[in-house]
Image (cartoon, helix red, strand yellow):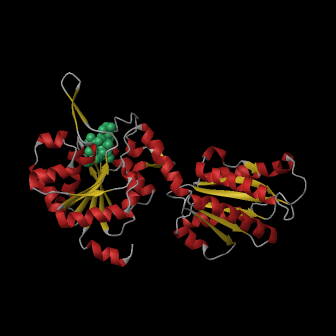
């Protein structure tokens, strides 16, 4: 975040993430916030989305008593920072209230949380929240006392009569769906929760409504993006996983050693991939070994690497890249895809000629999978004078794209042939 933006928040901000539900509508034994997306619990994605914003000082995660230890182990495993875990209540409103109470109550504890001027409330099951909308709701809350993200209605809202027939319908264009995040001047929402009835706490679904009813605060409504939707049903988990895979496949880094053939092939692959990822608004980067820009690539959150090994039977380059990736710890949050490309410069392109590498790569891939790095082998027949070279490169780029988009852990160690 640019310093200008930090200054423009101009208030202390904390966040409360209600995560104490059981996910009945999703119908899994595991509450949806703990369901794995690419091997990592959904809640960890949401926590990360807030934690990376440096103007949010504390993040309070509210979970049910039986999940407190699970949450603590997630924090430990994924290295989350600035998190306080609080026990939830029977309903979402009761969980949020518990989360808010920790600020004034923690004064008595050994490491008290500073009561913020503005508090963000955001469902733990909406993992794709961006800094832009958080900033908008926080600034609007500072000005109006409360603010929340909204979306156009997908379907018309109708009211039914006691006999199940249509009573009336609402004019869709005049209504909006209330989504999250929402933000409040802390004292307003805290007072609203203190004053509201048990009925509100047990049956209410809208924090903005509490601020209006009990503190006469008319929240500012802000149009949010479609990605703010709440994971509610099983199909939402599949959709969330697809979005994550799509985001992860936006950047590809092609690295090669200094041998002429490897550099040429690397460059051709990079050019071809560049066109593919550009269509998906992504980018491809081409680096020779030891290029010190590699570190920037990691900081830029690249999770896909193509490593060109000059020799057909040699995985030395790939091994070195695995070591670098491991040291940079980039696979802690997301699985990294590493495609080990091997040049076949001989005319003999029979299937058996690739087989001897299969065993080696398979064992190696099994080992590094434990580090969350998914290695796949790709054999490319390379002859720079071959008139069909571009065809081969296109086929290799298509295989690479499919492996990156799919991130299938079952296919690691396979040696594919382009
Ligand atoms: N007692 C509760 C109930 C819900 N939530 C949280 O509120 C958010 C939004 O609620 P919802 O989607 O309704 O979650 P669940 O209650 O878990 O789902 P369901 O209604 O299908 O059981 C979720 O992050 C959920 O964990 C909470 O903190 N405490
Ligand atoms: O969108 C919201 C706030 O306006 C809430 O996420 C939503 O209302 C939660 O309700 P429920 O737990 O019944 O799904």
> Which is more toward the observer, 362 or 351?
351
Vertical relation: 11 (above or below) 347 = below
Give left or right: position of 119 versus 262: left
Which residue is farthest right?
A: 347
- Camera-side residue of 382 and 295: 382
List x then y, in percent, for residue 221. Answer: 24, 57
Q: Residue at x 67, y 54 (%)?
A: 400
Q: Is residue 115 visible?
A: no
* 325, above or below 63, in the image: below
Please tell me in which quadrant of the rendered image residue 283 appears.
bottom right
Residue for point 61% across, 53% down: 404
Q: Horizontal and vertical percent for residue 276?
A: 63, 58
Q: Nearer the viewer, residue 71 or 97?
A: 97
Whole-percent x and y of residue 54? 35, 69
Residue in view at x 23 percent, y 39 percent = 170
State the image coordinates of residue 266 (x, y, percent, origin top left). Answer: 73, 66
Whether residue 254 appears in this view of the structure is yes
Is 96 rendered above or below residue 309?
A: above
Viewer-proximal residue among 145 and 101? 145
Name, please, the residue furthest toward the top: 163
- Which quadrant is home to the N terminus? bottom left
Q: How many marks?
A: 0
Q: Quadrant of residue 105?
A: bottom left
Ligand number 2: quarter of image: top left
From the viewer's perspective, tell me whether residue 409 is left or right of residue 190. right
């Amino acid at each position: 975040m640019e310093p200008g933006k930090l200054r423009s928040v101009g208030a202390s901000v904390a966040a409360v993430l209600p995560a104490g539900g059981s996910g009945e509508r999703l119908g899994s034994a595991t509450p949806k916030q703990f369901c794995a997306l690419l091997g990592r619990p959904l809640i960890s994605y949401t926590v990360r989305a807030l934690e990376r914003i440096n103007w949010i000082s504390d993040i309070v995660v509210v979970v049910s008593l039986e999940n407190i230890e699970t949450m603590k182990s997630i924090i430990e495993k994924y290295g989350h920072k600035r998190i306080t875990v609080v026990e939830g209540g029977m309903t979402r409103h009761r969980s949020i209230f518990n989360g808010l109470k920790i600020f004034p109550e923690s004064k008595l504890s050994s490491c008290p949380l500073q009561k913020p001027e503005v508090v963000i409330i955001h469902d733990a099951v909406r993992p794709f929240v961006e800094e832009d909308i958080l900033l908008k709701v926080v600034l609007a809350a500072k000005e109006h006392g409360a603010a929340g993200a909204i979306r156009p209605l997908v379907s018309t809202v109708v009211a039914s009569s006691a006999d199940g027939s249509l009573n009336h319908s609402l004019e869709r264009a005049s209504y909006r769906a209330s989504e999250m995040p929402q933000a409040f001047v802390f004292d307003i929402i805290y007072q609203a929760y203190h004053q509201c009835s048990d009925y509100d706490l047990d049956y209410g679904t809208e924090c903005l409504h509490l601020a209006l009813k009990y503190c006469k605060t008319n929240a500012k409504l802000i149009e949010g993006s479609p990605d703010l939707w709440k994971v509610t049903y099983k199909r939402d988990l599949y959709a969330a996983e697809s979005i994550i895979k799509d985001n992860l496949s936006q950047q590809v880094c092609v690295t090669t050693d200094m041998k002429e053939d490897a550099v040429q092939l690397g460059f051709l692959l990079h050019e071809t991939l560049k066109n593919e990822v550009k269509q998906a608004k992504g980018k491809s980067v081409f680096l020779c070994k030891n290029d010190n820009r590699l570190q920037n690539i990691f900081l830029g959150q690249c999770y896909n690497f193509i490593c060109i090994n000059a020799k057909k039977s040699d995985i030395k380059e790939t091994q070195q890249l695995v070591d670098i990736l491991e040291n940079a710890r980039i696979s802690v949050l997301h699985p990294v895809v590493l495609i080990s490309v091997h040049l076949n410069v001989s005319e003999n392109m029979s299937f058996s000629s690739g087989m001897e590498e299969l065993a080696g790569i398979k064992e190696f891939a099994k080992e590094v999978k434990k580090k969350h790095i998914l290695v796949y082998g790709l054999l490319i027949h390379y002859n720079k004078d071959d008139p069909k070279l571009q065809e081969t490169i296109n086929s290799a780029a298509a295989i690479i794209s499919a492996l990156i988009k799919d991130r299938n852990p079952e296919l690691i160690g396979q040696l594919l042939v382009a």
